[in-house]
Image (tube, rainbow, N blue to C red):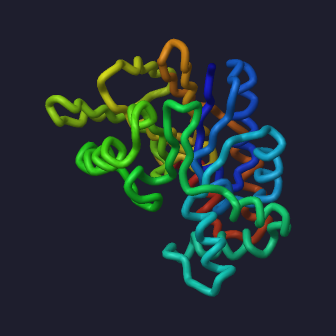
Amino acid sequence: MRYAVFSDIHANLEGLMAVLEKCEQVEADALVCCGDIIGYCADPNACVELVRKKGVRCIQGNHERGLRDLGEGRAPNMNPVAMEALAFTREVLEAENLAWLLSLPHEAEIGGFFHVFHGSPSDPDEYIFDAFEAAYAFKALVNEYPPPGNMLCFIGHTHVCAAYAFDPVNHRVAEQKVRDGDLFAIKPGAHYMFNVGSCGQYRGGLPVATFCLLDGDEMTLEYHFLEYDLRSCQRKVIAAGLPSILAQRLSLGQ
């Protein structure tokens, strides 16, 4: 079975459509999202409706939890630009789509052999940027989740693709930067954590939408970096009255 795993759509309909089109081309059997379907860009309703239509298995990200905070009278822990985008999202979201987002779990086990988290196995809002931070996440994955599901997990949140492997014998974490087309073999005995990047606001220095394709039979994983209709997304961000930096950063991949 082939699983397409992506994250951080952030209401970027053009990025999401590019990923879903590629998923069809590579004949993915199941679609999985690591959270943050909304926030930053101008198409929250269209993105929610599309992932629901496509049967994407989704969890909450910090932006979905931010919606809950707003609804319950709490201030989300976000910077002013993210807060402005979240307020816009809360205003335009249809009630059915909001209720669906708030019903999503914070994590999920998929296929009985891997997990998806938004930030980290230890904390859904934790950022993992390097091997040192990944080591603490692996500790939670290995000790708090039973095998075989603790051998492999996927995360997002940083918007940057990365691959980490933990050797339980030598207690070492290896980190590898990721490029388009990189293929990883998942070997028995090790634990793996793959950051799938973002299909809505990639921050690895490229104006792309990213996702991973996991072959559950061959136990291989391939990264895909895709071009999308960036200009259309930017125009809609500006037309919606969202902060202009949210349009500008898409071109920069930041």
Q: Residue at x 66, y 70 (%)?
A: 85
Work out which quarter of the rendered image holds the N terminus and state it.
top right
Q: Is residue 195 left or right of residue 100?
A: left
Q: Residue at x 81, y 70 (%)?
A: 92
Q: Quadrant of residue 228?
A: top right
Query: Where residue 138 appears, x then y in whole percent?
Result: 31, 44
Query: Where residue 64 appears, x then y in whole percent?
Result: 63, 64
Query: Where residue 74 appears, x then y in whole percent?
Result: 58, 84
Q: Quadrant of residue 18?
A: top right
Q: Is residue 143 left or right of residue 27?
A: left
- Return the residue found at the far front: 146
Q: Is residue 94 above or below residue 84?
A: above
Q: Is residue 199 left or right of residue 46?
A: left
Query: Where residue 176 appears, x then y in whole percent?
Result: 32, 31
Q: Residue at x 77, y 65 (%)?
A: 99
Q: Residue at x 78, y 57 (%)?
A: 43
- Return the residue found at the far bottom: 73
Which one is in front, 77 or 148? 148
- Return the residue found at the far left: 170
Which one is in front, 168 or 242? 168
